[in-house]
Image (cartoon, helix red, strand yellow):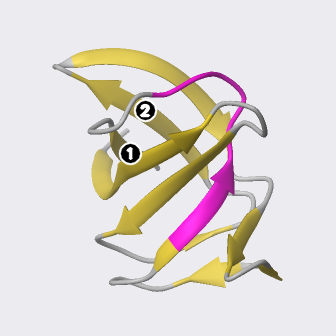
């Protein structure tokens, strides 16, 4: 099982549980990801919802900045890895 970095959390909205993510690779709904900060695994989840400018999307590409619904609180600077 190899994990590769797909993005970085640039902001977190705690009231709505949404992380703003700058993507380094393609990502789609249903992908399994994990959040890592300071070398420590925080949590894993499936990508359930992503938006760009308040429009729901199923896939995002490298270089996109997306809003992503997250299961737990995550701090700015957390890296996101796709679990394959």
Q: Judging from the image, what secondary structure is the residue with disc 1 in?
A: strand
Image quadrant assignment for residue 31: bottom right
The answer to whether 28 appears left or right of 63 in the picture is: right
> Contact (CB < 8 A) between labels 2 and 1?
yes
Label 2 crowd bin: few (<14), some (14–19), many (20+), radius 10 Å: many
Q: Earlier in the sequence, mark 2 or mark 1?
A: 2
Which quadrant: the N terminus? Answer: top left
Q: Nearer the viewer, residue 69 or 5?
A: 69
Tag 1: Cα neighbours inside 10 Å, few (<14), some, or many (≥20)? many
- Tell me where the magenta segment starts and ends, as one range: 66-74
67 magenta-colored: yes
The picture places residue 18, in percent across and down from the top left corner, at 67, 46
Residue at 74% x, 58% y: name it: 30
The residue drawn where x is 28% and y is 53% is 5
Asked whether 64 or 58 is in front, the reply is: 64
Could you tell me if residue 20 is visible in this image? yes
Residue under pointer 2: 35
Q: Residue at x 79, y 59 (%)?
A: 49
Residue 28 x %, y %: 64, 71
Q: Could one spot residue 82 in this view of the protein?
A: no
- The residue that label 1 is drawn on is 80
- Quick one: SS at disc 2? strand
Residue 35: image x %, image y %? 43, 32
User: Is residue 44 shown left or right of residue 42?
Assistant: right
- Give the CA separation, mark 2 to mark 1: 5 Å
Q: Depth check: 43 or 68 in front?
A: 68
Q: Is residue 63 magenta?
A: no
How many discs appear?
2
Q: Residue at x 37, y 69 (%)?
A: 23
Q: Nearer the viewer, residue 11 or 39?
A: 11
- The location of residue 39, given as percent across then percent down, is 17, 19
């Amino acid at each position: 099982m190899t994990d590769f970095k797909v993005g970085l959390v640039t902001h977190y909205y705690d009231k709505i549980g949404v992380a703003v993510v700058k993507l380094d690779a393609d990502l789609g709904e249903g992908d399994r990801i994990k959040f890592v900060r300071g070398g420590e695994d925080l949590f894993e989840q499936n990508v359930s919802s992503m938006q760009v400018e308040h429009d729901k999307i199923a896939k995002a590409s490298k270089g996109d900045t997306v809003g992503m619904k997250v299961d737990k609180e995550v701090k700015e600077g957390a890296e996101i890895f796709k679990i394959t």
